[in-house]
């Protein structure tokens, strides 16, 4: 296993020198007078399996983040209006797109749902949509045909062209765009079902590899090789949810054990075969899956995109964000 991030690692400070660093207390001061619009019950309905978030953490971490994002959204609107005025055309209604990335089991979905709720309940009640990239995974049959079922979640397992087209259409002002629906029970795309997205003010795209971009070598440039388009090209802001690898592994194993006693018991579940494992067998299976698949994907594809994010939310072993890094302008 690659050593975990250490706060005393000089190379870590060098790699993140382009960021402003805030402790949780320092970041919380930037909340200003932003009101907390969630009750405890509403918050817990947004929290993912085995994740933990308190109202205090929302106030300290997510309210300042929401406040700054809303400033960015308004600035983007002003820029669109200015451009339209310059061109002598009506300003198209296009969403402000936020990408949220991070490892399996780190809490991306919880972060995304909390931000969606806070943004939607802000002044003016903007229309905020949340779309996970799971829906753009290739169907299980296609993954089997390509012999990459064990690489599900790796970049090659996604229909990247469809994902890029989805976001491009929304950015072009299309009144209605559809996305496939994914089932975590069947581990597959749901046939004949789509999620309809209609001109949101803010669109949150959440997924493992959403911050990926193209690495072009001097040879590519010299040869005139065309550049590829990535979904990250359409992001106005981006967030990376981070934590030490040992903590993420522990959270993943805890979640696997919870699923073993719940979802995996459903005969329709793709992982129903795991329901009959002993506790020790389940622990061994969870650790094997983490280290052979999810950790590998984290090292090869996800972690290398961290420094592209505008915000990095660093979690401690208790799941709570204890540091925020804001990319310098």
Image: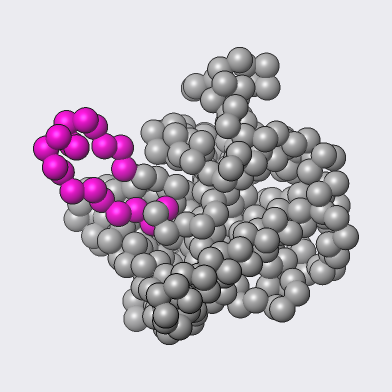
At 42% from the left edge and 59% from the top edge, which residue is drawn? 234
Q: Position of residue 221 (x, y in %)?
A: 19, 37
Quadrant in the picture for residue 159: bottom left
Q: Is residue 124 magenta?
A: no
Quadrant housing residue 189: bottom left
Residue 36: which quarter of the image? Answer: bottom right
Residue drawn at (73%, 42%), measured in percent from left and top?
321
Q: Is residue 74 left or right of residue 318?
A: left
What's the residue at 64%, 41% (across, down)?
A: 326
- Please provide percent x and percent y for residue 306: 51, 38
Query: Relative to the observer, which residue lies in front, 134 or 148?
Result: 134
- The magenta region covers 214-232
Q: Locate residue 208, reporting x and y percent.
A: 46, 49
Is residue 226 covered in magenta? Answer: yes
Residue under the image location 35 percent in, 63 percent down: 163
Quarter of the image where the C terminus is located:
top right
Residue 113 lies, with reference to residue 286, above or below; the image says: below
Front residue of 32 and 259: 32
**Depth check: 237 or 298 in front?**
237
């Amino acid at each position: 296993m690659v050593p975990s991030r250490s706060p005393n690692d000089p190379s870590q400070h060098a790699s993140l020198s382009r960021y402003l660093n805030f402790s949780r207390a320092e970041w919380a001061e930037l909340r200003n007078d932003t009101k907390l619009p969630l009750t405890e019950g509403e918050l817990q309905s947004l929290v993912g399996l085995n994740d933990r978030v308190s109202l205090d953490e929302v106030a300290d971490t997510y309210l300042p983040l929401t406040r700054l994002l809303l400033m960015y959204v308004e600035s983007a609107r002003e820029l669109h209006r200015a451009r339209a005025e310059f061109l002598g055309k009506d300003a198209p209604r296009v969403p402000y797109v936020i990408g949220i990335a991070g490892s399996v089991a780190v809490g991306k979905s919880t972060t995304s749902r909390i931000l969606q709720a806070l943004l939607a309940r802000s002044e003016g009640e903007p229309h905020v949509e949340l779309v996970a990239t799971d829906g753009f995974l290739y169907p299980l049959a296609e993954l089997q045909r390509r012999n990459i079922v064990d690489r599900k979640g790796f970049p090659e397992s996604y229909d990247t062209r469809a994902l890029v087209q989805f976001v491009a259409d929304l950015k072009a002002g299309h009144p209605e765009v559809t996305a496939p629906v994914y089932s975590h029970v069947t581990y597959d795309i749901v046939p004949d079902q789509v999620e309809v997205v209609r001109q949101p003010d803010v669109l949150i795209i959440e997924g493992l590899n959403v911050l990926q971009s193209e690495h072009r070598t001097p040879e590519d440039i010299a040869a005139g090789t065309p550049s590829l388009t990535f979904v990250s090209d359409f992001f106005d802001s981006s967030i990376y949810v981070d934590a030490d690898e040992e903590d993420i592994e522990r959270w993943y194993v805890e979640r696997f054990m919870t699923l073993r006693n719940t979802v995996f018991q459903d005969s329709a579940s793709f992982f129903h075969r795991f329901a009959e494992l002993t506790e020790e067998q389940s622990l061994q299976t969870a650790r094997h899956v983490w280290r052979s698949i999810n950790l590998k994907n984290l090292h090869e594809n996800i972690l290398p995109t961290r420094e592209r994010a505008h915000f990095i939310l660093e979690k401690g072993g208790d799941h709570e964000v204890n540091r925020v890094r804001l990319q310098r302008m």
